[in-house]
Amino acid sequence: MEITLRVNGSRRTVEVDPRVSLLDLLRERLGLTGSKKGCDHGQCGACTVLIDGRRANACLALAVAQDGSDITTVEGLADGDRPHPLQAAFIEHDAFQCGYCTPGQLCSAAGMLAEGGPSAVTEDMAADPALTAEEIRERMSGNLCRCGAYPNIVTAIAEVAR
Amino acid sequence: MRSFEYARAGDPADAVARFRPGAMYLGGGTNLVDLMRLGVAEPEFLVDVSRLPLDRIEPDGDGLRVGAAVRNSDLGAHPLVRERYPMLARAVLAGASGQIRNMATVGGNLLQRTRCPYFQDVSKPCNKRQPGSGCPAIAGDHSNLAIFGHSSACVATHPSDMAVALAALDARVHVTGPGGDRVIPMPGLHRLPGDEPERDTVLAPGELVTAVHLPAPPPGASRYRKVRERASFAFALVSIAAALDVAEDGTVRDCRIALGAVAHAPWRCERAERALRGAPAGEESFTRAAGAELEQARPLPRNAHKVPLVRNLIVLTLLELAP
Ligand SMILES: Cc1cc2nc3c(=O)[nH]c(=O)nc-3n(C[C@H](O)[C@H](O)[C@H](O)COP(=O)(O)OP(=O)(O)OC[C@H]3O[C@@H](n4cnc5c(N)ncnc54)[C@H](O)[C@@H]3O)c2cc1C
Ligand code: SF4
Ligand code: FES
Ligand code: FES
């Protein structure tokens, strides 16, 4: 089937089999290997991209079902040569070790910062809580890091959230 | 993954008209695509209903109407849901991850399938996946499976958090299909396994969930609590949605209790509710009510821990809600 997407600002029209995930399309057809495949089951977050500005697991998204959508991958976060504030903060705070989870962490954090509202650890559902370390941990729980860089990831995100 | 055709439906009638044997509706795909990759689901045709114009949350009488294509994250973040149905907002936010909630739809969340390990493993027999092949969970790993309402054919649980809150809120599920429209009161959408564990719900082939109607919120305080193996991003071992309304004289005027991860359907605790109405709101009544419900529990050898878990969760949650 033929689908058209905007990927990191450019229009891409591709012919895809309905079985292909958005993740495989990005990595194998469009050469955007920043998004990683950790589990292929929605459990690790390494494949996180923004679909129409909202974070999503590209491994569980069928490419055909995204026809007409606007996709941002880690390759599209920076503004030209200027890294995204989250990218700068991750470097500044040493928020990675092997780096495999990092593209997913960055896209997830970018989506998360735009979300607002309560989370599962918020006491009052009607409130819009401040992004404390506890709130950031809960909101980022869909991104696993097998190197355990969590403390620095939380610090980096907290700096950008301020 | 087996090959299949894909089409995006324009409206609910179009979705139903396109449905044919071998077809499945596709919501956010967070459960279905996973099961297709595992070989558990093998649809020949996917009718995408995730972009149907059923994505609104609107006041409806003294309640709220939630479209079936509303994303879980939008449900949990909606001001009217947070203010009037905080139990529902909390249940939705306790499920999955931020990414998955952005993709998952209300219809798909209701119709997600069990996380029984054998159901997800096509190298194993499973009556739900392959009727008549047997249930290895009964003699095997059933540590997170049912203690209520199971059968000798299947001991699976329904994993949704949202559905537990909907069961406590007396929500009604609106459905359209080849046979017309109908309304199903929760928790009646999901069935007990009996001798047909392959059927999770009372829906007929081709029936499409279009909306969930929430009646006026129950009076009094309410809460959703989830017990799990880690603090976030894990399915429930047991969960509870409860509401408690206490009269001036300290007796229980009304209450709602529903449990998750203990049965093939969200489990509404009618016996406990009956035992509580009119009783003094205190630890003694709460313990008695939990006991009344648990009289009908039939724990399996390796999930008997769920019995004290349920008892403590009911008592602690009601104590928290009592004035
Ligand atoms: C890693 C992981 C962790 C998770 N943790 C939790 C958790 O803690 N708590 C929890 O509650 N859930 C959890 N989930 C499950 C998640 O909530 C469900 O996958 C999601 O809600 C399904 O919604 P969907 O729109 O993606 O459905 P889909 O995957 O698209 O569909 C699911 C089923 O519903 C059917 N369907 C979809 N829409 C309709 C409709 N309108 N009418 C009729 N049938 C329809 C489909 O045919 C399919 O059978 C988790 C999932 C993952 C992958
Ligand atoms: S409990 Fe149900 S889903 Fe699990 S193996 Fe038995 S029949 Fe299958
Ligand atoms: S690869 Fe998508 S969540 Fe792990
Ligand atoms: S930095 Fe190695 S997995 Fe996170």
Image: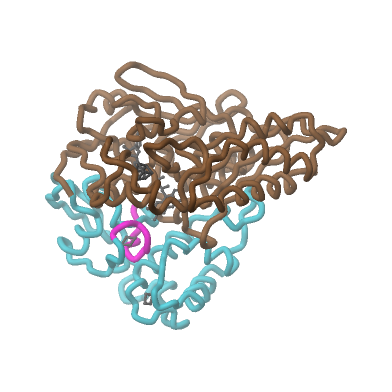
Chain colours: A cyan, B brown
Q: Quadrant of the C terminus of chain A?
A: bottom right
Counting labels gives 0
Q: Residue B311, image x and y in percent?
A: 65, 47
Q: Quadrant of the N terminus of chain A?
A: top left
- Which quadrant does ligand 1 occupy? top left
Q: B26 or A5, which lies in front? A: B26
Q: Is residue B11 visible?
A: yes
Q: Is residue A69 visible?
A: no
Q: Residue A38, image x and y in percent?
A: 30, 66
On screen, residue B317 above or below B67: below
Judge left or right: residue B90 versus residue B120. Answer: right
Judge left or right: residue A41 versus residue B235. Answer: left
Let me know if residue A2 is in the magenta part: no
Let me know if residue A43 is in the magenta part: yes
Q: B272 or A69, which lies in front? A: B272
Q: Magenta stretch: dominant SS?
A: loop
Q: From which residue to which does the magenta span run?
A: A40-51
